[in-house]
Image: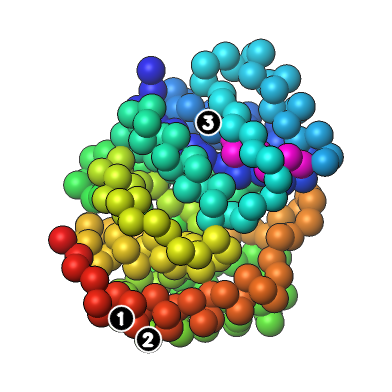
């Protein structure tokens, strides 16, 4: 039984599914992978199930009835990971925007240096983003600045989706329902970890835009993040964080 689990949500990722699974196993030997699959019409689930014959108990799939949002996919995976007693729980995208070779760098602060959570950060050392148009780089960078201003978090990359959690962090965060399901989910998880006083480390990574498949970003997701942050900050004033 491994003490490490990498959670990868998928929806229409047939171009990336096999290669990301193989890359993760190569980069982090001994880990397990959980694919949270949202009923992709392109056959992503069939690709994963075919690989399960090769990788056995190291590769798992949880199939859901339909596309329910990134946040709910991760929450499903987190609850599964906690129930199966994994100690180090990663989240990452399926499209190689998060380089699997960076997984050991995220593990080290949690496994060796006493941190509770590690974030793969695009902005801790300048701006490390490849293949994005300048307009999107600026949107992302200033969105993180906006979140820091509203929430007062001392985290440079507040919208990052490449992370490693210790199990006890997720157990604490998930004591209350997580409100947001889009990219505001990423902010909410960091905000809760920060408010609870967990020790957080930002690890520099290089983020590369996907080269296969289609982006899931939408205006509704951006809108949720903008207004969700204000609501998140306001509601936090009336909660106990202990």
| Disc 2 secondary structure class | helix
Q: Are marks 1 and 3 in contact (CB under 8 Å)?
A: no
Choose the circle earlier in sequence order: 1 or 3.
Answer: 3
Residue sitting at x 36%, y 42%: 107
Residues under labels 2 and 3: Cα distance? 35 Å
Could you say where residue 83 lies in the image, as x and y percent from the top left? 37, 31
| Disc 3 secondary structure class | strand
Could you say where residue 41 lies in the image, as x and y percent from the top left? 82, 41
The residue lying toward the viewer, choosing from 224 and 118, is 224
Residues under labels 1 and 3: Cα distance? 34 Å
- Range of the magenta residues? 35-40
| Residue position for label 2 | 149
Residue sitting at x 49%, y 40%: 77
Residue sitting at x 42%, y 40%: 79
Local packing at callout 1 (Cα closer than 10 Å; few below 14, some 14-19, many 20+) is few
| Disc 1 secondary structure class | loop
In this image, 232 relative to 64: left or right? left
Q: Are marks 2 and 3 in contact (CB under 8 Å)?
A: no
Residue sitting at x 69%, y 66%: 217
Task: Report if residue 198 lies within the magenta region.
Answer: no
Could you say where residue 147 lies in the image, as x and y percent from the top left? 43, 79
Q: Quadrant of the N terminus?
A: top left
| Residue position for label 1 | 152
- Position of residue 32 relative to residue 13, above or below, is above
| Residue position for label 3 | 33
Q: Are marks 1 and 2 in contact (CB under 8 Å)?
A: yes
Q: Quadrant of the C terminus?
A: bottom left
Residues under labels 1 and 2: Cα distance? 5 Å
View extreme (left): residue = 242
């Amino acid at each position: 039984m491994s003490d490490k689990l990498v959670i990868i949500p998928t929806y229409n990722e047939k171009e990336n599914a096999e290669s990301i699974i193989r890359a993760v196993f190569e980069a982090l030997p001994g880990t397990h992978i959980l694919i949270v699959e949202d009923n992709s019409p392109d056959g992503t689930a069939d690709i994963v199930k075919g690989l399960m014959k090769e990788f056995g108990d190291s590769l798992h799939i949880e199939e859901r009835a339909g596309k329910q949002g990134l946040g709910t996919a991760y929450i499903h995976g987190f609850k599964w990971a906690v129930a199966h007693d994994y100690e180090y729980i990663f989240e990452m995208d399926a499209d190689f925007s998060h380089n699997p070779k960076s997984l050991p760098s995220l593990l080290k602060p949690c496994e060796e240096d006493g941190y509770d959570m590690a974030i793969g950060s695009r902005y801790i050392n300048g701006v490390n983003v490849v293949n994005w148009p300048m307009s999107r780089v600026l949107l992302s960078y200033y969105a993180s600045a906006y979140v820091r201003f509203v929430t007062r978090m001392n985290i440079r990359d507040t919208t990052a989706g490449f992370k490693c959690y210790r199990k006890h962090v997720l157990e604490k965060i998930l004591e209350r329902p997580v409100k947001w399901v889009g990219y505001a989910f990423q902010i909410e998880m960091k905000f809760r970890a920060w408010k609870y006083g967990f020790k957080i480390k930002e690890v520099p990574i290089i983020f590369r835009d996907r080269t296969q498949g289609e982006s899931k970003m939408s205006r509704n997701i951006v809108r949720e993040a903008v207004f969700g942050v204000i609501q998140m900050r306001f509601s936090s004033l009336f909660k106990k964080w202990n």
